[in-house]
Image (cartoon, grey):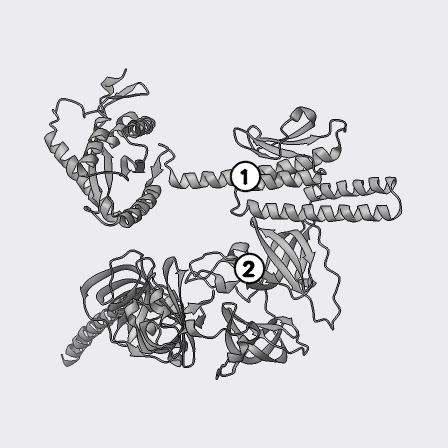
Amino acid sequence: MKDSGRFRLRAVSSVGAALIRNLSLAVAMATAWTLATWATEPATLTTLHAIHALTKVEAGSGLSVAFEGTVTYYNRSDVDLFVQEGDEAIYVETKPNEDFASGDRVLVRGKTRDSFTPDVVSNSVTVLRHGALPKPVAADFQQLIRAQRDCMRVSVRATLRSADIVNFRNMHGIYLKLLMDGGPIDATIVETDATKFKGLLDADVEVTGVVSGKFDSKMQLIGILLEVPSVADVRTLKPAETDPGSLPITPMDKVLSTSYVHDVTQRVRVKGTITYYQPGSAVVLESGTKSLWISTRSSIPLRIGDVAVATGFPDAHEGFLALNDGEIQDTNIFEPIQPQPSTWHQLAIWNTGDTDGHQNDLVSFEGKVVTAVREGAQDEFVIASEDKLFTAIYRHPPANRPLQPMLQIPVGTRIRVTGICMVVQANSIDPTEQEVPFNILLRSFNDISVIASPSPLSIRNLVLLVGVLLVLLFAAGARGWLIERKVRRQNAAMAYIERRRSRILEDINGARPLAEIIEQITELVSFRLSGAPCWCQIEEGAQLGNCPSNLTAFRIFHEPIPARTGPPLGNLYAAFDPLTKHRAIESETLFAAAALTTLAIETRRLYSDLVRRSEFDLLTDIHNRFSLERYLEKQIEEARQNASIFGLVYIDLNDFKQVNDVYGHQVGDLYLQEVTIRMKHQLRPADMLARLGGDEFAVLLPKVRNREEIEEIAHRLERSLDEPFATEGYVVHGSASTGIALYPEDGPTKDSLLSAADAAMYVNKHIRRESREVPTDLPLPGLSPKDRK
C-alpha cells in the first residue's frame, strides 16, 4: 500500500511538473513577444536630454518626440524655431507664419533628424501658456565656436564692426558683424531701420540672442550666427572712442598701416587619402564622407591615392571648412578613393538638412563637350549634362614645370569626367537655395575619358565644312600674304560665331527674354552672311531683327522655323543684293539658325505651359487653389500696406455629386464649365474666380467698399445659376450656396479668411436645406432625367 501511494504521488508530481513547464514556456514566449514589440516600437522621447543623447545614426532614424519647452526665438517669415528647457536647447524646423512669441510654453511633437546635432522636424507645435524667457547665459567665443552653447539663449560682449540691411533667408533684416575676444561672429535682427546702429559702430555692446550657426553644404560649422529678437536686445556697454564720420582721410596706399591682428588659433592635425594635389597651392584629403581643402606652399612629390597626414590652421575657405598653411606628410600607404558616380542634380544640390553636399569630394559623371578653351592659368572644358552646363577645369602646373598640349576633344563628344567638386562662389549662396553652380577640378588629362564620339551630322561639323570650303575658295583666288590674312580673319569669325552660339544656348536655358534671344540669332545670321539684313517673323507674333523698309530692292531668301509637331513657328528672312546669286551658305546658315530658333521658342513655350498648368484648372480654365492662395497672400500684404479691405466669396454647388451619379461625369464636366462661364459674367475685371476642387469655387474681390457689396456680388453669383443648364440632351437645374468673408474683420490671414468664408457657406447651405421642402413622390431637385429635351 505504501508503494502504491508513492506511485500516485509521483504521478501527480509529474503532471504538476508538466503544467509548470508549459506555463513557464508560455510566460517566456509572452515576455519575448513583448520585448520584441518594445524593440520594434521605440518609446517617444520626452526630454531634450534624451534627444541630445542620441547618436547621429539614431537621430537619423526619425524617432518620435513629444516634449515641452520655452520658445526663445521664432521668425514668422522662416521655419526656424528655438526651444529651451533649463540648460538644454534644441532647433525645431516648423512652419512659417505661426503664432509663436518668445516666452511661450509649447508642446512639440515630431521626429528626430540627423543634422549638425540631433534636432527635430515638427508635426505640431502647441502653445500651452505664456511665461518668462530663460535667463541668458554669458558665453565667450570658445564656447560658441565649440558648440557648447548651441541653440541656447546667451549674452555676449563684443565690438560692433558693421550694421547693414540685407536679404537673408527670405527676410529683410539687419546683419551685424561683431568682434569678440577670440574671433568674429555675426547676428541678425528682424528690423529694417539700420540707422539705429550707425552711432554704435566700434562701440562695445552686449548682445542677447539665440546661438545659431553658419554651415557649409555638409552641415559643418563654419561660423557663429546669433538670432536676435529685437533692437532692444543690443545694449551699449562703452561708446566708441571716435565717431567714424570724424576720422581723417587715409591715403589709399596707406590703409594697411592701421591693420593689427592677434591670432592665437591652434594648429590641428588631420588624416585622409590624397584625392587632389597642385604643388605650391592646395591638397585635398578625403576620409569616408568627409573631405577637406588644405592650402599649402609645399611642392614636395605626393602621390594621388596615398594616405597622408596634414597639419594646419582651421579656416572657412570660400564658405567651406579648410586648413591654411598646411604641412603634408605622405605615409606612402596606397589606399585610393573611388570616385562617387554622380549626376548634375546630385552635385548641384545644396544642403537640405538631411542630404550632404559634395564640396571637395572626388566624383565622376558623364556629359557632352560643348566647347573647350585654354586660358593663361587653366584649361576649361564646358560640358552639358541633364540640359545643364558646368565647367571641368585643369589648372596649369607651376611655371618651372612643362605644360602639356591641351587635350583636343571634338564638340559633341560624350565623356566621363573625374575630379574634385568645387561649388562656385559658395560665400554668396543663400542657404535657402536648393541648387548651386559648381565646377569639376581635374588632376590631369587622364581624368577625362571618351565614351562616344560626336555624331558627324552636327551643326558644328556643317559649319566647319563650310569653313573648309571657304578656305579652299580663298586659296584658289588669292596669293601670298593676302591668303594668310583672309584665313586668319575667317578663323576669328568662326571662333566669334561659336562663342556667340554657346552664349545663346546658355541664354535659352537662362532667364533672358525670348525676344532678345531671337534678336541675337538674327544678328549672328547677319554676321555670318557678311552683314546681310536678317529678321524673324513669329507666326501670329512679333517681327524681330533688322528688316529693310523697301523689300523690293533686295533678293529675299527665307527658311521656315520648324516645330516638332504641327505647322511652322514662323520664318527667318535674309536680304541680299539682287545682282547676287543664291549660295549654299545662305541655306545652311538660315537652316542652322532656324533650328536654334525652334529650340528657343519651344523651350520657352514649354516653360510657359508648365507654369500655366500649375496655376490654372485644366477643366474650367480658371485659377486653381494654389494660384488663389498665392494671390490671396499678396492681397493681404497689399491691404496691410494700404490699410484697405477686400472680400472673399466661397461657393459650393448644391447636389453636384448627384449630377455625376445620374448623368455621368462627362455631363458633370460640361455642367462645371457652364457654371464657370456664368459666374465669370457676374464679376468685374479685377475680380478673380478660382476652382478649389470638385464643386467648390472661390472669388477674390480686391476692391470692395463694405460687406453689403460683397453680399450683393455673392447673391448675383447664386442667381446666375437659376436658369436651367441644357447639355448633352439633358436639362439640369443647378444652384449654389455661398459664404463671404471680409478682410481683416473676418480674419487677418489666408487660412482664417478661407475658413471664415467656408463656415459662412455651410451655414447658408444648412439654412437653405432646412427651408427647402422636397416632396417624397418627386425626384431630387435638378436631377430628373425627365427633363431631357
Query: What secondary structure is found at the residue carrying circle 2?
Result: strand
Horizontal and vertical percent position of residue 197: 35, 69
At x 24% / y 58%, what residue is drawn?
A: 99
Query: What secondary structure is found at the residue carrying circle 1?
Result: helix
Image-based side of 206 in relation to 167, left or right: left
Q: CA distance from mark 1 to mark 2?
A: 29 Å
Horizontal and vertical percent position of residue 259: 51, 79
Is residue 30 at least partly visible in the picture? yes
Q: Which of the 4 quarters of the picture holds residue 517?
A: top right
Looking at the rendered image, the disc whose residue lies closer to the viewer, 1 or 2, is: 1
Q: In the displayed image of the protein, which residue is found farthest to the right?
A: 479
Task: List the residue tagged with mark 2.
Answer: 438
Q: Nearer the viewer, residue 86 or 729?
A: 86
Image-based side of 64 in relation to 317, left or right: left
Q: What amino acid does circle 2 point to?
A: Phe
611 w.r.t. 447: above or below: above
Disc 2: CA contacts within 10 A as few (<14), some (14-19) or many (>=20): many
Q: Which mark is residue 515?
A: 1
513 w.r.t. 542: above or below: below
Quadrant into which the C terminus falls: top left
At x 52% / y 28%, what residue is drawn?
A: 540
Number of marks? 2
493 w.r.t. 41: above or below: above
Horizontal and vertical percent position of residue 315: 50, 75
Q: Which mark is residue 115?
A: none
Q: What amino acid does circle 1 point to?
A: Ala
Q: Nearer the viewer, residue 50 or 565?
A: 565
At x 68% / y 77%, what residue is drawn?
A: 301
